[in-house]
Image (cartoon, rainbow, N blue to C red):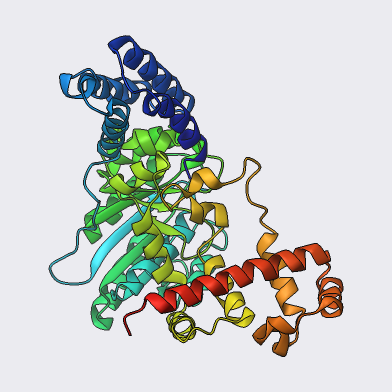
Amino acid sequence: MFEELGNKLDTVLGKFRQRGVLTEPMIREGLREVRRVLLEADVNYKVTREFLERVQEQALGERVLKAVSPGQQIVKIVRDELANLLGGEPPTLDWASSPPTVIMVVGLQGSGKTTTVAKLAKRLARQGREPLLAACDPYRPAAVAQLQTLGGQIGVPVYAGEAGSNPVEVALAALEKARKAGSAVLILDTAGRLQIDEPMMDELRRLKAELAPREILLVADAMTGQEAVRIAEGFNEALDLTGVILTKMDGDTRGGAALSIRGVVGKPIKFLGTGEGVDDLDAADPDRLAGRILQMGDVVGLVERAEMVMDADEQAQLQKQMLKGRFTLEDFLGAMRQVQKLGPMEQVLKMIPGASRAIPAGGIDPNRMKHVEAIILSMTLAERQRPEILNGSRRARIAKGSGRPVAEVNRLLKQFKEAQKFMKQMKGMMPF
């Protein structure tokens, strides 16, 4: 997410950090480079100009020029203004005083709308709000079946209505069902089109008029750049959107759509789709996103992701083992599998402040975890629990069984030994 933009901004802002004294010409030159980076990232020209005007006004102030660390002051100004550009305040959903709250999800075909509906439902269900999904897309082949499959996967009921029903009839029947069932929220998966057209907009307007949704969320493909912004403008003009969900943020996106939508359309980005899994939907907190763009990490986001995907019982058992000072290769494998649930290792490291700079230039080998797992699974249970018995012949057997060189087996055992020492030190620091 924002990888290319973040790397380029980090390079430019790094020049500010390295200087003990900054002059006005230096600042103007540096901000010209920031402008180039933002435009290359496909950020809207008007949004870029206004952003840099605000940054420059503050950066050329006496407080910055005379500061002990002017470079860090400028980085902070850029970070704060990026957060403002993304909306300033953390976006929230508008809940009805009496349930169900109706959320209408709209978008073009191919934007990931139906999958996003399921992701949003799972997120809300995890928060204790029981959702009902309504399949209001009778036009796209298998659209209803796709939503039903996803609903079964996440354990959320789906209302599809009678064959031949129009979307408004389905939505109204689903609303009645949600009321009777005591559902906290009704999410409408509306029909998409290959492009914006009046028949589609008329149907969406009728849905809005009949259902009175508290939220109308547009699902837009971040990889389309400024096209996503234009699509948002079109939907907003017809429906008065309450927010946007940007999908495919884990893909080859330059970040321009995310940084432009609030400034151009005036509507907040509420969620970001960061992968294909049903858990891959992050809240679009402007302050945290600004930190991620500038490679300052997002610890809160990492904790939230851990709470969503990690098994609480396994975590408790691992913690118990650590507190007892017993940490085996079996535990090591369990901990590694828990970490894998958080997503690709590079993505996880980028959420830890400062850790992104430790990522090798060629990136982290995505097969590294699989190799470690293969090595440990090639051991007997006794060897995993007592790695000290692993002599040369055993290591050779494990290397052969896992298809990895003996040197890699030795390296893993060395790393594990260091981890064991760290766990013992941690145990010694505990007050109980």
In the foreground, 209 or 412: 412
Quadrant of the rendered image containing residue 30: top left
> Residue at image x 57%, y 46%?
359
The x, y position of residue 280, in whole percent, is 47, 60
Left or right: residue 328 compared with residue 14: right
Q: Which of the image's four quarters has the C terminus?
A: bottom left
The x, y position of residue 324, in whole percent, is 46, 87
Q: Is residue 80 above or below residue 60?
A: below
Answer whether residue 324 is visible to the viewer in this image: yes
> Residue at image x 39%, y 56%?
282
The x, y position of residue 92, in whole percent, is 23, 56
Q: How many marks?
A: 0
In the foreground, 89 or 194: 89
Query: In the displayed image of the protein, which residue is found farthest to the left?
Result: 97
Left or right: residue 404 compared with residue 207: right
Query: In the displayed image of the protein, which residue is found farthest to the top?
Result: 25
The x, y position of residue 21, in whole percent, is 31, 19
In the foreground, 51 or 396: 396
Answer whether residue 269 is visible to the viewer in this image: no
